[in-house]
Amino acid sequence: MVHCPECETTLAEADDIEFSEMDATTGFLAASKRFYTANCAACGATIGSGVAGAKAGGGGAV
């Protein structure tokens, strides 16, 4: 079983984690990337993060 390192809440269901999209940035190919964090739904602690693919309407390669 997985637990939040901050509050020790058991993370067993999809509702136990909240995903938040952070500000998008534009890279050298003019494609906007999405950054996200995974947060504990009980205490709000960030327990993970990552980068998703190009955001819709991000411009793409020129």
Image: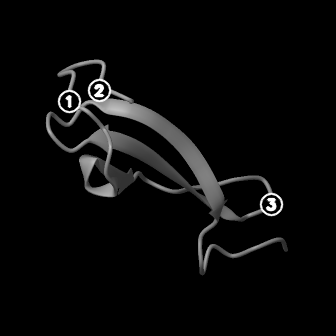
Q: Which residue is mark 2?
A: 4
Kind of residue sitting beneath label 2: Cys
- 62 relative position to 45: left or right: right
Name the residue rendered at 43%, 53% in the picture.
23
Name the residue rendered at 26%, 56% in the picture.
15
Q: Which residue is mark 3?
A: 29
Kind of residue sitting beneath label 1: Thr
Q: Quadrant of the N terminus?
A: top left
Mark earlier in primary sequence (2, 3): 2
Name the residue rendered at 60%, 48% in the picture.
51
Mark earlier in primary sequence (2, 1): 2
In the rendered image of this protein, does residue 29 appear above or below residue 1?
below
Name the residue rendered at 46%, 49% in the picture.
36
- Most foreground residue, 21 or 46: 46
Q: Which mark is residue 9?
A: 1
Residue 53: quarter of image: bottom right
Using the numbered discs, state the Cα–Cα distance from disc 2 to disc 3 in whole angstroms.
Answer: 37 Å
